[in-house]
Structure formats: structure tokens, C-alpha cells
Amino acid sequence: MKRSLIILFLVVLTQLFVGCYETDDGTFTEPITIYEKIGGTWELSKITEVDEIAVASSLKPDAINLTNYFDFKSFSITLNVDENFEPTTFEVGGNAPELFLKNGYWELSNPFPNTNATSVKIRLFADESKSEPVDELSIMALPGRRATLDFNLTRVADGIPFVTYEYALKLQD
């Protein structure tokens, strides 16, 4: 009995060491980037304007839903990526007021979610060399099971945020 237990123990121990050195399928797969998740055309579901001064002062109302005003329902944004999922150009469609560039070039501040719980930024550029950012959109929610993307555009004067536009978007069919 004791001898059988020793043999069984050695077999299990051997399997543990052998199993640790084999990969599941023998190939390495690159991790999925945010570029792969957000590339495409996104249609507006909702846009909210938040008065940051009212929020800081605990005044009401501090936000207003703009979705049904100023033709915001027609807003869409296309974030183009190449065959390697590298960012190329973007284009805003619809007749909504221009809160940021209508077209240009884009990139992310980080191709993966930040580990320090800060939001990844979509940097918008007017020039192809991406030398001077024009605007930054803060990603608040990434597509997962549902094909939704949320980002914020905050306007700042003298280092103080005064208005934020919260966009909720869905992937165009």
C-alpha cells in the first residue's frame, strides 16, 4: 500500500512538471488592444452637458440631456484603423454642433486599459504627423459584451474645468 502511494505521488508530481512547460496550442497570441475594440463607426445614443461649476458648487441643475436638441441625434464618429489595428483617421458625421474637430488623425494615450484606474485618452490631431494634439476625449466605458463606447470631452479655462460633454455611443450596424 505504501509503495503504491509513493508511485502514485511520483506520477502526479512528474505530470505537474511536464505540464508546466507546454503551451496550450503552441502559438503566442498578441493581446487585444483598445484599438481593436473601438475601431469602426459609432452612433450617438445620448449626450449630456455637465456644468462643472454647478457640480463643484452643489447647485442644481448641474446637467442637461442634449440628445434631442441641436440635431445631436445625427452625430456619429468613425475611428479608422489599418489592417494591423493601428489608428489612422477619424471623421465626425451628422449635423450636430462641432464640439471638436470634424476630421483628422487620432491615437490613444495607451493601447491597453490603464492599471492606475485613470481613463485612456483619445487624442485628436489635425496633422498626419500627430505633432500637436487638438483635443482629448476621455474614454469612460469600453465595448465589452455590449457594443457601447462612452467618452467625455471636458473644456478647461485657466486650468479649471467648466463644462463636460458625456457621449454615450453604440456601434453602427
Image (tube, rainbow, N blue to C red):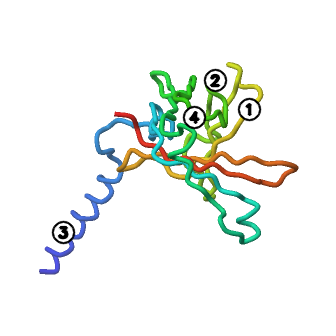
Work out whether mark 1 precedes mark 4 in sequence or the reverse, and give the earlier one.
4
Amino acid identity at mark 4: Ala
Q: Residue furthest bottom?
A: 1
Amino acid identity at mark 3: Ile
Image coordinates for residue 159, horizontal then vertical, percent: 84, 51
Q: Are marks 1 and 4 in contact (CB under 8 Å)?
A: no
Q: Which mark is residue 163?
A: none
Q: Nearer the viewer, mark 4 or mark 2?
A: 4
To which residue does mark 3 refer?
7
Q: Are marks 2 and 1 in contact (CB under 8 Å)?
A: yes
Work out whether mark 3 precedes mark 2 in sequence or the reverse, and give the earlier one.
3
SS at mark 2?
A: strand
Q: In 3D space, how far apart are the residues under numbered discs 1 and 3 (Cα atoms)? A: 69 Å
Amino acid identity at mark 2: Gly
Q: Relative to residue 143, is residue 52 drawn left or right? A: right
Q: Residue furthest right?
A: 158
Q: Relative to residue 18, is residue 102 drawn left or right? A: right
Tell me where residue 161 sits by quadrant. Answer: bottom right
Q: Residue at x 62, y 59 (%)?
A: 63
SS at mark 4?
A: loop
Q: Quadrant of the N terminus?
A: bottom left
Q: Residue at x 57, y 23 (%)?
A: 89
To which residue does mark 1 refer?
134
Q: Residue at x 68, y 40 (%)?
A: 136
> Label 4 crowding class (10 Å Cα cut-off): few <14, some 14-19, many 20+?
some
To which residue does mark 4 refer?
96
> Label 1 crowding class (10 Å Cα cut-off): few <14, some 14-19, many 20+?
some
To which residue does mark 2 refer?
104
Amino acid identity at mark 1: Val
Q: Are marks 4 and 3 in contact (CB under 8 Å)?
A: no
